[in-house]
Amino acid sequence: MISSPRVRRGACVFAYSLLIALAVLFFCSKSSPGYPINDWCDANIYFTIGKGMTRGQVVYRDLYDHKGPLLYALHALCALVSFRDFTGVYLMEALLAAAFLCGVYRLLSLYGARRAAWLALPVGALLIYSSYSFCEGDSAEELCLPLLIWSVYIALAFFRSDRPRMGKGALMGLGALAGCVLWIKFTIIGLQAGVVLALLLHHALRREWRELPRAIGWLFLGFVLSTLPWIIYFGVNGAIGDWLKVYLYDNLFEYSSGVHFSSRLDRVQTVFTCGWNWLTANLRYTLPLLFGLGWFALRRGLSLSERLTAWLAAALGALSIFIGGISFAYYGLALAALAPLGFIAPAQWLEPRLGALRAPGRAMLTAVACAASAALCLPLSYNMNADYGATFGQPREQTMQYRIAAHIPPDATLLNYGFMDSGFFTAAGLVPNVLYFHQNNVPISEMPREQARYIAEGICDFVVARTPNPQDIDLHYELVATAESPNFWYEDVYLFQKVR
């Protein structure tokens, strides 16, 4: 029934989680209205391709980038909300963060800490979303957090029950969640692989041989259901080959082709260094994560399957993220999905003490925790740091992107030449008209060659570049504007207009 206590409680938890998410992300994510623009190149790439999808362009075939199709589809939905700014992206981030926090609530409730969960949610949101690896906001890792926490919860809820088998719906849900993560960014899938492996080992160790094929079958069906929309989408558009070539081949064989290891030991050391750098740079949530792993290893009364779930998810998750030997700041954020494991023990300690308080007292503590967490975002968020631009509250017209966009008419075409999409398509409200609309970090020779051809043939109306003299630029273009870049790895940008 809609009016059942369980449904009402769930609605209250989601509303509470959404309020926390909106408040924390308002300060921690550059997608929020508190910032003039999210100037992170990855966020702009996702949004630019999402806008292209709303105009009938097909990712990989018409617009090149190497993340998963679901990531761009989510940004296409955001573009339907707001085409020229990140308001829609901010709302998406908040909704997904609320879903993540609901998963944290269910996890803590599973271990007997329902009252304490109300205090843990704002604190956990602060620790994770103000962390170094959160970066400017809108990373693929961030958007996967709710998919990961709910996968962990589904497995642990089964292991703590007295049911002999996991239900079909739960198994399909696990498979579908894994499929969604795969089609956002496949290097994150290791965490869910650990969860699934723990489930299969659970049946194998209990010699439940009939359950193994049953579980695998329903898991696979859930995965297929999450994959089927993309088979249809790319099949209808004749782009299955483009999809597989870019998302699988280019990522597996081109993306890290510049990374070379002198020996197996060198690879191990590099992978360990990547993991260690992430661990030490994000102590706000890695300390709870480590504490949680230790608690799951040593706590009496936990089943072997519960312990395996926590440890295999962490081990395989870290391995899949760092094994390539490349690690940007945001890579390890996916592992923050396991940080709530470290909230369980403190929440259990707090639970009976909260039970001794009257309802008004608990409400007051919750309100204080929420207000304090939101307020602490101001000094703790890395986006308030000068190294990240510190653009909170800055007028749009003062930013590099909108200063350049002021010279570009709404019906023009634009090329982001020689560097990654830095927000000029967003500020101008444009959709690219060429495949390599920017130059990303996949080292394929065709990309710079094609960008040079676009200039030589005058294919785009405007070209924005980091250099005042791109090759052949004087054949069709003239310099019309420059803008200083306050917080990028280049000093200025130059806007060229096609000479009619």
Image (cartoon, rainbow, N blue to C red):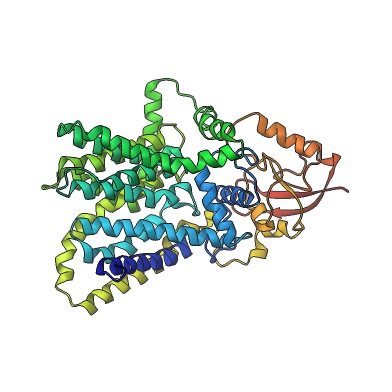
Seen from this angle, which residue lies furthest right?
A: 500
Given residues 342 and 453, the one toward you in this image is 453
**Can residue 63 be seen by looking at this rendering?**
yes
Seen from this angle, which residue lies furthest bottom?
A: 360
Seen from this angle, which residue lies furthest front?
A: 1
Among the 4 quarters of the image, the one containing residue 402 = bottom right
* Image spot of residue 151 (x, y percent): 32, 47
* Image spot of residue 239 (x, y percent): 60, 36
**Can residue 30 be seen by looking at this rendering?**
no
* Image spot of residue 345 (x, y percent): 19, 55
Q: Is residue 32 above or below residue 319?
A: below
Among the 4 quarters of the image, the one containing residue 110 = bottom left
Given residues 211 and 437, the one toward you in this image is 211
Total marks shown come to 0
Relative to 142, 366 lies left or right: left
Given residues 235 and 181, the one toward you in this image is 235
Given residues 404 and 110, the one toward you in this image is 110
In which quadrant is the N terminus drawn? bottom left
* Image spot of residue 184 (x, y percent): 47, 44
Q: Is residue 176 above or below residue 214?
A: below
Seen from this angle, which residue lies furthest top?
A: 263
Relative to 181, 59 lies left or right: right
Q: Is residue 81 above or below residue 195?
A: below
Give the residue at x 79% y 48%: 461
